[in-house]
Image: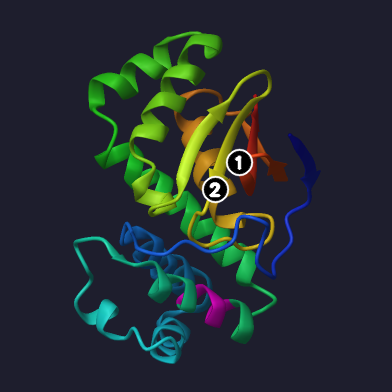
Amino acid sequence: MRYAETAFPAGAVSAGGKASGVIGPNAALQLAAAMTALQGGTDTDRLFDAAGLSCWLSAPPGDMVPVCDVERLYAVLYRDWPKIGGAVCADAGRRTADYVIANRIPAVVRSLLRMLPVDLSAPLLARAVVRNAWTFAGEGALRVLPGRPMKFLLQGQALAIAGCPWHRAVFRQLFRVLVSPRATVAHARYAGPDGPGDVLIVRW
């Protein structure tokens, strides 16, 4: 197994490839919120219209949505707003994490995580993240790799943008809110016998 840590680029597709199937709607809905906060509603309308997804603004989906539609939305973002694509992705990821914390992790678990020492809370949060991976990984595979620092391996995930800015922001916010405010997340490309992927390296 090999992985090499990378920076936070804003471009091309990473080694993880593209996933088919569906993903949680927050991948798109929180992008709309982030784009509106940074650029205003007019640019948000332009973004979704260019991706053929204006209907998601007038009638936000409540169920899983096609990965191909969400990937097209992010591709348009990077094509038409290349200078701010990374910033919008990062804010959308943070907002998605806040949604997961509020709606996918029970209140008693949130309280427990915040009370426990980091070396206990981090593994517990990792298990909760893996259980709810569909929210942000679509039909991609997510697992925790052995060893320290903590490493999550994503394979076949949606939104495989180089450097995984959206996923990095999701994990950073989850760990900062529930484990340690000093948490950081780095990205590495993965090459192993089970195929390529992306590694998110969590430190605190």
Residue 168's x, y, as percent? 59, 47
User: Is 192 located above or below residue 140 in the figure?
Assistant: above
Residue beneath label 1, please? Answer: 194
| Residue positioned 37% across, 89% down in the render | 52
Residue 7's x, y, as percent? 78, 51
Q: Which element is circle 1 on?
A: loop
| Residue positioned 48% across, 71% down in the render | 71
Q: What residue type is labelled 1?
A: Asp
Q: What stretch is highlighted in magenta?
A: 73-77
Q: What residue type is labelled 2?
A: Gln
Residue 141's x, y, as percent? 46, 44
| Residue positioned 41% across, 51% down in the render | 136
User: Is 51 located above or below residue 129 in the figure?
Assistant: below
**Label 1 crowding class (10 Å Cα cut-off): few <14, some 14-19, many 20+?**
few
Residue beneath label 2, please? Answer: 155
Left or right for 96, reference 12 = left
Question: Could you say which is closer to the camera, residue 84 or residue 189?
Answer: 189
